[in-house]
Amino acid sequence: GRSGALLPPFVVTPSQWELGPGESIDVTVDFAPEEHGLLERGFRLVCDNCSVHAYSVRGHALIPSLQLCSIDTLPIPRPLSDALRPSTALAFQPIAPGASSRKTLVLKNRTPLGMAYHWEVVHEDTPHTEKEEYLKRHGKVGVTHKVFSVSPAEGNIDPSGTLSLDITFSPTGSVLYHATARLIVHHLPAPDHAAHNDASLPAELLTPGFGAAGHAYRDEEVARVDLRGFGSEVRVIMEPQILMVAERLSVGNTYTRTVKVKNDSGAPTELSWERYPELLYQAVRVVPDRLTLGPHEEKTIKVEIRPKVVAPLVVSIGC
């Protein structure tokens, strides 16, 4: 009948037909392999006029896989580059909260099969992010805020093409962070079989024992990256840190010295200096007493000294 001839891993449909003069029919061959490699099967077409024609069908089964080519332009050595399901770890250098650091990964499609994909980034708690102090200030990592991201987050990998990905770390606090990024490819054959009432597959492809034809289809992980990064405190450099005024200061006059302040971090920061109380014998202040610095920005501030009485002047001002 028209149910199809089983030639695992092929199904030829229909297996029988009748044609009148000038009529034609489409013959469909379904290929559903259970193993990879080049597969070939032969069959004969017998007509009622006793003629026999021999045919063969051939298919090439491939395992969808990716190759990890490089991280930040550095090529990946073997055996990691040979893995069919690459798994690697990335550790980011400590950066200030609010700053961002990025690493670029390049993956290559080993097969002539196009793949639709998306990334899943699962943030995991560390001893630092589990603390009550962190939870009260920032919330739960991965829920109220995320510090790791992958771009593009979804798309298509061209047949035999390459995929360039940017993984970004943007810490919220000065703590250790950990996450796992999983590359998920859509609609791949699964190792278990589909239910026999699965309407998405033709009935003949659910035949027991017919290789992968009876398998279910689902999204599958094809690559994994373990991510770690540390948020560090903002580092500010002041030059000079000690002002030595090697001269006699006259009462009532104002003397000005300059100090260079540099933000040696990759995140903006705001500084403020304590206001030293104007005692009877001395008056010192920083101008301005509040300062905002961008990433790696440097500014100059002034320290004004105005003695009121004749006496030694030693002042320490906190920032």
Image (cartoon, helix red, strand yellow):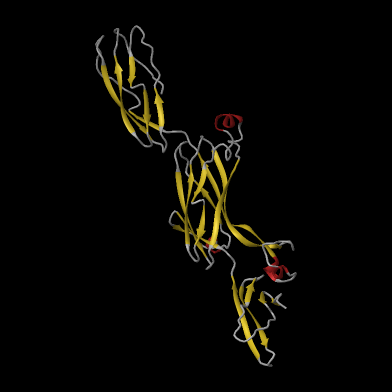
Residue at coordinates 55% horizontally, 29% vertically from top-left?
137
Q: Is residue 247 left or right of residue 187?
A: left
Q: Percent x, y for residue 94?
A: 47, 41
Q: Is residue 115 above or below residue 253?
A: below
Q: Is residue 303 above or below residue 114?
A: above
Q: Is residue 267 above or below residue 164?
A: above
Q: Is residue 297 left or right of residue 78?
A: left
The answer, for residue 222, to whether it is visible in the render is no
* Quadrant location of the N terminus in the rendered image: bottom right
Residue at coordinates 61% horizontally, 60% vertically from top-left?
187
Q: Residue furthest bottom?
A: 50
* 225, 141: nearer the viewer: 141
* 61, 204: nearer the viewer: 204
Numbered disc total: 0
Q: Percent x, y for residue 114?
A: 53, 64
Q: Is residue 94 left or right of residue 185?
A: left
* 280, 141: nearer the viewer: 141
Residue at coordinates 40% horizontally, 26% vertically from top-left?
271
Residue at coordinates 62% horizontally, 71% vertically from top-left?
36
* 309, 199: nearer the viewer: 199
Q: Is residue 177 above or below residue 258?
A: below
* Quadrant location of the C terminus in the rendered image: top left
Q: Percent x, y for residue 306?
A: 29, 13
Q: Is residue 84 left or right of residue 94?
A: right
Q: Quadrant of residue 210?
A: bottom right
Q: Quadrant of residue 23?
A: bottom right
Q: Percent x, y for residue 134?
A: 57, 32
The answer, for residue 130, to whether it is visible in the render is yes
